[in-house]
Protein backbone atom coordinates (compact mmCIF):
# COMPACT_ATOMS: atom_id res chain seq x y z
CA UNK A 1 0.00 0.00 0.00
CA UNK A 2 1.13 3.53 -0.73
CA UNK A 3 1.31 5.87 2.22
CA UNK A 4 -0.05 9.41 1.88
CA UNK A 5 2.60 11.67 3.37
CA UNK A 6 0.86 15.00 2.73
CA UNK A 7 0.28 16.98 5.89
CA UNK A 8 -3.16 18.51 5.82
CA UNK A 9 -5.19 19.83 2.91
CA UNK A 10 -3.38 21.79 0.20
CA UNK A 11 -4.27 25.51 -0.12
CA UNK A 12 -6.73 26.35 -2.87
CA UNK A 13 -5.37 27.41 -6.25
CA UNK A 14 -7.45 30.60 -6.10
CA UNK A 15 -5.90 31.57 -2.79
CA UNK A 16 -2.38 30.92 -4.06
CA UNK A 17 -3.07 32.89 -7.23
CA UNK A 18 -4.52 35.83 -5.28
CA UNK A 19 -1.49 35.99 -2.99
CA UNK A 20 0.98 35.72 -5.89
CA UNK A 21 -0.69 38.51 -7.85
CA UNK A 22 -1.01 40.81 -4.82
CA UNK A 23 2.60 40.21 -3.75
CA UNK A 24 3.95 40.69 -7.28
CA UNK A 25 1.86 43.76 -8.12
CA UNK A 26 2.24 45.37 -4.70
CA UNK A 27 -1.46 46.19 -4.21
CA UNK A 28 -4.69 44.26 -3.87
CA UNK A 29 -6.42 46.64 -6.28
CA UNK A 30 -3.88 45.92 -9.05
CA UNK A 31 -4.10 42.19 -8.38
CA UNK A 32 -7.89 42.40 -8.62
CA UNK A 33 -7.63 44.06 -12.04
CA UNK A 34 -5.27 41.36 -13.31
CA UNK A 35 -7.41 38.51 -11.98
CA UNK A 36 -10.69 40.19 -12.99
CA UNK A 37 -12.16 39.93 -9.50
CA UNK A 38 -13.00 42.43 -6.78
CA UNK A 39 -10.50 43.97 -4.36
CA UNK A 40 -12.30 42.33 -1.45
CA UNK A 41 -12.12 38.92 -3.13
CA UNK A 42 -8.33 39.17 -3.36
CA UNK A 43 -8.02 40.21 0.29
CA UNK A 44 -10.38 37.42 1.36
CA UNK A 45 -8.42 34.77 -0.56
CA UNK A 46 -5.12 35.95 0.92
CA UNK A 47 -6.64 35.72 4.41
CA UNK A 48 -7.85 32.17 3.60
CA UNK A 49 -4.31 31.25 2.53
CA UNK A 50 -2.77 32.71 5.67
CA UNK A 51 -5.23 30.75 7.82
CA UNK A 52 -4.53 27.58 5.85
CA UNK A 53 -0.75 27.93 6.21
CA UNK A 54 -0.84 29.22 9.79
CA UNK A 55 1.50 32.13 8.96
CA UNK A 56 1.22 35.81 8.11
CA UNK A 57 2.24 36.63 4.53
CA UNK A 58 1.89 40.42 4.74
CA UNK A 59 2.70 42.87 7.53
CA UNK A 60 2.25 46.60 8.08
CA UNK A 61 -0.59 49.09 7.52
CA UNK A 62 -3.09 48.44 4.73
CA UNK A 63 -1.78 51.30 2.58
CA UNK A 64 1.83 50.07 2.80
CA UNK A 65 1.86 46.28 3.16
CA UNK A 66 5.16 44.43 3.02
CA UNK A 67 5.89 40.73 2.62
CA UNK A 68 6.86 38.79 5.71
CA UNK A 69 9.72 36.30 5.61
CA UNK A 70 7.21 33.56 4.81
CA UNK A 71 5.73 35.66 2.00
CA UNK A 72 9.15 36.35 0.50
CA UNK A 73 9.90 32.63 0.55
CA UNK A 74 6.62 31.66 -1.11
CA UNK A 75 6.38 34.35 -3.84
CA UNK A 76 9.20 33.38 -6.27
CA UNK A 77 8.18 29.72 -6.23
CA UNK A 78 4.56 30.54 -7.05
CA UNK A 79 5.51 33.08 -9.73
CA UNK A 80 7.72 30.53 -11.47
CA UNK A 81 5.00 27.88 -11.28
CA UNK A 82 2.23 30.09 -12.65
CA UNK A 83 4.51 31.43 -15.40
CA UNK A 84 5.30 27.86 -16.43
CA UNK A 85 1.60 26.99 -16.58
CA UNK A 86 0.85 30.10 -18.67
CA UNK A 87 3.74 29.33 -21.02
CA UNK A 88 2.65 25.72 -21.51
CA UNK A 89 -0.95 26.72 -22.27
CA UNK A 90 0.19 29.39 -24.73
CA UNK A 91 2.49 26.97 -26.57
CA UNK A 92 -0.39 24.55 -27.11
CA UNK A 93 -2.94 27.20 -28.01
CA UNK A 94 -0.84 29.49 -30.22
CA UNK A 95 1.68 27.16 -31.85
CA UNK A 96 4.68 28.87 -30.30
CA UNK A 97 5.14 31.87 -32.65
CA UNK A 98 3.15 34.44 -30.70
CA UNK A 99 4.99 36.89 -28.47
CA UNK A 100 3.27 38.34 -25.39
CA UNK A 101 4.93 41.50 -24.02
CA UNK A 102 3.78 43.69 -21.11
CA UNK A 103 4.68 47.38 -21.39
CA UNK A 104 4.28 50.43 -19.16
CA UNK A 105 1.42 52.48 -20.59
CA UNK A 106 3.40 55.64 -21.43
CA UNK A 107 6.26 53.75 -23.09
CA UNK A 108 3.69 51.77 -25.07
CA UNK A 109 1.57 54.72 -26.20
CA UNK A 110 4.33 57.26 -26.89
CA UNK A 111 7.21 55.08 -28.09
CA UNK A 112 6.50 51.42 -28.88
CA UNK A 113 3.12 51.41 -30.64
CA UNK A 114 4.07 54.18 -33.14
CA UNK A 115 6.98 51.93 -34.25
CA UNK A 116 5.19 48.58 -34.36
CA UNK A 117 4.52 48.88 -38.08
CA UNK A 118 8.28 48.57 -38.54
CA UNK A 119 8.42 45.41 -36.45
CA UNK A 120 5.48 43.89 -38.34
CA UNK A 121 7.33 44.53 -41.62
CA UNK A 122 10.57 43.16 -40.15
CA UNK A 123 9.06 39.95 -38.78
CA UNK A 124 5.53 39.42 -40.15
CA UNK A 125 5.63 35.81 -38.89
CA UNK A 126 5.70 36.92 -35.23
CA UNK A 127 2.31 37.86 -33.80
CA UNK A 128 3.09 40.44 -31.10
CA UNK A 129 0.51 40.93 -28.35
CA UNK A 130 0.81 43.80 -25.86
CA UNK A 131 -0.53 44.07 -22.32
CA UNK A 132 -0.36 47.01 -19.93
CA UNK A 133 2.27 46.64 -17.23
CA UNK A 134 1.42 48.14 -13.84
CA UNK A 135 3.52 51.26 -13.04
CA UNK A 136 5.85 49.62 -10.49
CA UNK A 137 5.62 46.00 -11.68
CA UNK A 138 8.60 44.12 -13.08
CA UNK A 139 6.61 41.14 -14.33
CA UNK A 140 3.17 40.34 -15.71
CA UNK A 141 1.27 37.06 -15.58
CA UNK A 142 1.98 35.00 -18.70
CA UNK A 143 4.12 37.62 -20.45
CA UNK A 144 7.24 36.46 -22.28
CA UNK A 145 8.95 39.73 -21.34
CA UNK A 146 8.27 43.25 -20.13
CA UNK A 147 9.41 46.63 -21.49
CA UNK A 148 9.83 49.51 -19.07
CA UNK A 149 12.28 52.09 -17.70
CA UNK A 150 14.60 50.51 -15.11
CA UNK A 151 17.48 51.77 -12.93
CA UNK A 152 20.81 51.55 -14.75
CA UNK A 153 22.12 49.13 -12.11
CA UNK A 154 19.71 46.47 -13.40
CA UNK A 155 21.29 46.44 -16.88
CA UNK A 156 23.98 44.03 -15.65
CA UNK A 157 21.38 41.39 -14.71
CA UNK A 158 20.81 38.34 -16.88
CA UNK A 159 17.92 38.79 -19.31
CA UNK A 160 17.87 42.60 -18.98
CA UNK A 161 18.63 44.39 -22.26
CA UNK A 162 18.83 48.17 -22.28
CA UNK A 163 18.02 49.73 -25.63
CA UNK A 164 17.94 53.50 -24.91
CA UNK A 165 19.82 55.46 -22.26
CA UNK A 166 17.33 57.73 -20.53
CA UNK A 167 17.61 61.52 -20.32
CA UNK A 168 15.00 63.76 -18.71
CA UNK A 169 14.21 67.45 -18.98
CA UNK A 170 11.41 70.02 -18.82
CA UNK A 171 9.40 70.58 -22.01
CA UNK A 172 6.63 73.01 -22.97
CA UNK A 173 5.19 74.54 -26.09
CA UNK A 174 7.34 77.21 -27.80
CA UNK A 175 4.64 79.79 -27.08
CA UNK A 176 4.68 79.00 -23.36
CA UNK A 177 8.48 78.99 -23.33
CA UNK A 178 8.47 82.48 -24.84
CA UNK A 179 5.93 83.67 -22.27
CA UNK A 180 8.13 82.34 -19.45
CA UNK A 181 11.46 83.24 -21.03
CA UNK A 182 12.70 84.78 -17.77
CA UNK A 183 11.96 81.63 -15.75
CA UNK A 184 10.68 78.48 -17.45
CA UNK A 185 10.06 76.85 -14.07
CA UNK A 186 7.48 79.49 -13.14
CA UNK A 187 4.95 77.88 -15.48
CA UNK A 188 2.38 75.41 -14.19
CA UNK A 189 4.17 72.16 -13.38
CA UNK A 190 2.60 69.08 -14.89
CA UNK A 191 3.26 65.94 -12.84
CA UNK A 192 2.55 62.26 -13.49
CA UNK A 193 1.16 60.35 -10.52
CA UNK A 194 2.85 57.18 -11.81
CA UNK A 195 6.22 58.97 -11.48
CA UNK A 196 5.73 61.58 -8.75
CA UNK A 197 9.47 61.95 -8.09
CA UNK A 198 10.21 63.06 -11.67
CA UNK A 199 10.58 66.76 -10.87
CA UNK A 200 12.77 66.10 -7.81
CA UNK A 201 15.05 63.75 -9.77
CA UNK A 202 15.54 66.29 -12.56
CA UNK A 203 16.17 69.14 -10.10
CA UNK A 204 18.88 67.09 -8.37
CA UNK A 205 20.52 66.22 -11.69
CA UNK A 206 20.37 69.83 -12.89
CA UNK A 207 21.47 71.33 -9.57
CA UNK A 208 18.32 73.46 -9.53
CA UNK A 209 16.27 74.42 -6.50
CA UNK A 210 12.59 74.32 -7.33
CA UNK A 211 10.74 77.36 -6.12
CA UNK A 212 6.99 77.58 -5.56
CA UNK A 213 4.81 77.14 -8.63
CA UNK A 214 1.29 75.89 -9.32
CA UNK A 215 1.10 72.15 -10.06
CA UNK A 216 -1.37 70.05 -11.99
CA UNK A 217 -1.29 66.24 -11.53
CA UNK A 218 -2.09 63.67 -14.21
CA UNK A 219 -2.57 59.93 -13.88
CA UNK A 220 0.12 58.89 -16.37
CA UNK A 221 3.27 60.25 -17.99
CA UNK A 222 1.66 60.24 -21.43
CA UNK A 223 -1.22 62.32 -20.03
CA UNK A 224 1.31 64.88 -18.78
CA UNK A 225 2.95 64.86 -22.21
CA UNK A 226 -0.37 65.49 -23.94
CA UNK A 227 -1.04 68.31 -21.47
CA UNK A 228 2.33 69.87 -22.29
CA UNK A 229 1.52 69.67 -26.01
CA UNK A 230 -1.78 71.42 -25.26
CA UNK A 231 0.10 74.31 -23.63
CA UNK A 232 -1.16 73.61 -20.12
CA UNK A 233 2.26 73.84 -18.49
CA UNK A 234 5.78 72.41 -18.27
CA UNK A 235 6.51 68.72 -17.69
CA UNK A 236 9.70 66.82 -16.91
CA UNK A 237 9.72 63.91 -19.34
CA UNK A 238 12.04 61.25 -20.80
CA UNK A 239 13.77 62.30 -24.02
CA UNK A 240 12.76 59.15 -26.00
CA UNK A 241 9.08 59.95 -25.42
CA UNK A 242 9.34 63.59 -26.54
CA UNK A 243 12.15 63.49 -29.12
CA UNK A 244 9.82 63.57 -32.14
CA UNK A 245 7.82 66.49 -30.71
CA UNK A 246 10.93 68.50 -29.80
CA UNK A 247 12.61 67.91 -33.17
CA UNK A 248 9.37 68.83 -34.98
CA UNK A 249 9.09 72.08 -33.00
CA UNK A 250 5.88 71.13 -31.21
CA UNK A 251 7.71 71.25 -27.88
CA UNK A 252 10.61 73.35 -26.64
CA UNK A 253 13.26 72.21 -24.16
CA UNK A 254 14.55 75.54 -22.78
CA UNK A 255 16.79 73.90 -20.15
CA UNK A 256 17.94 70.87 -22.14
CA UNK A 257 18.07 67.30 -20.83
CA UNK A 258 20.11 65.58 -18.14
CA UNK A 259 21.33 61.99 -18.22
CA UNK A 260 19.31 59.92 -15.74
CA UNK A 261 20.46 56.80 -13.94
CA UNK A 262 17.92 54.74 -15.84
CA UNK A 263 17.30 53.18 -19.24
CA UNK A 264 14.54 51.83 -21.45
CA UNK A 265 14.95 48.07 -21.21
CA UNK A 266 13.48 44.68 -21.98
CA UNK A 267 13.30 42.23 -19.06
CA UNK A 268 12.89 38.58 -19.89
CA UNK A 269 14.64 35.25 -20.28
CA UNK A 270 18.24 35.37 -21.55
CA UNK A 271 19.06 35.14 -25.25
CA UNK A 272 18.29 31.75 -26.76
CA UNK A 273 15.24 31.00 -24.64
CA UNK A 274 12.79 32.10 -27.37
CA UNK A 275 13.42 32.71 -31.06
CA UNK A 276 10.58 35.24 -31.30
CA UNK A 277 11.80 37.10 -28.20
CA UNK A 278 15.36 37.20 -29.55
CA UNK A 279 14.08 38.81 -32.75
CA UNK A 280 12.04 41.37 -30.81
CA UNK A 281 15.02 42.13 -28.55
CA UNK A 282 17.27 42.74 -31.57
CA UNK A 283 14.66 44.99 -33.14
CA UNK A 284 14.32 47.06 -29.94
CA UNK A 285 18.10 47.58 -29.80
CA UNK A 286 18.14 48.66 -33.47
CA UNK A 287 15.25 51.09 -32.90
CA UNK A 288 16.97 52.48 -29.80
CA UNK A 289 20.10 53.22 -31.81
CA UNK A 290 18.01 55.42 -34.13
CA UNK A 291 17.13 57.76 -31.25
CA UNK A 292 18.99 61.05 -31.76
CA UNK A 293 20.96 62.52 -28.84
CA UNK A 294 19.00 65.04 -26.73
CA UNK A 295 19.86 68.74 -26.47
CA UNK A 296 22.01 69.01 -23.36
Image (spheres, rainbow, N blue to C red):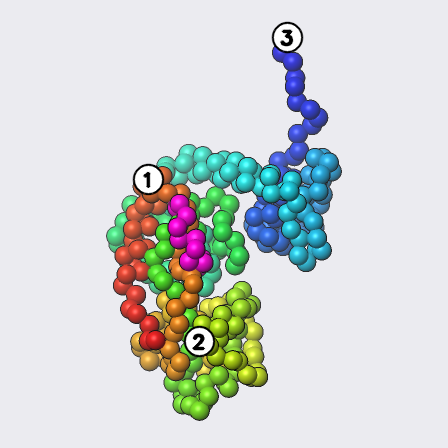
Task: Report the residue that reaches farthest toward the left.
Answer: 122
| Mark identifier at residue 272 | 1
Please name whichever residue, 177 or 162, is drawn nearer the observer in this view of the structure.
Answer: 162
Question: Which quadrant of the view contains residue 11?
Answer: top right
Disc ID at residue 206: 2
Coordinates of residue 236 in the picture (x, y in percent): 46, 74
Circle nearer the viewer, 3 or 2: 2
Give coordinates of residue 172: x percent, y percent: 43, 80
Is residue 197 covered in magenta? no
Q: Quadrant of residue 245?
A: bottom left
Q: Magenta segment: does it hold 158?
A: yes
Q: Which residues are magenta?
A: 148-159
Q: Visible in this render: residue 147?
A: no
As drawn, 235 above or below 186: above
**Mark 1 touches mark 3? (CB < 8 Å):** no
Quarter of the image holding residue 250?
bottom left
Amino acid sequence: MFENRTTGAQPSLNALRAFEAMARMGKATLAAEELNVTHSAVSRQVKVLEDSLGVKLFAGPKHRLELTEAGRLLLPQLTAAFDQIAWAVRQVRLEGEDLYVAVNASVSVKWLIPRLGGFAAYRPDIRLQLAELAPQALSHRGADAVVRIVPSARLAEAGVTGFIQNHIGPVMTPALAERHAADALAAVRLAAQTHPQGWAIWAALAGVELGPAPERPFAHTHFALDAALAGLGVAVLPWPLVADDVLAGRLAAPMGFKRAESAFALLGPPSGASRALDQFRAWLVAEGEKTPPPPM
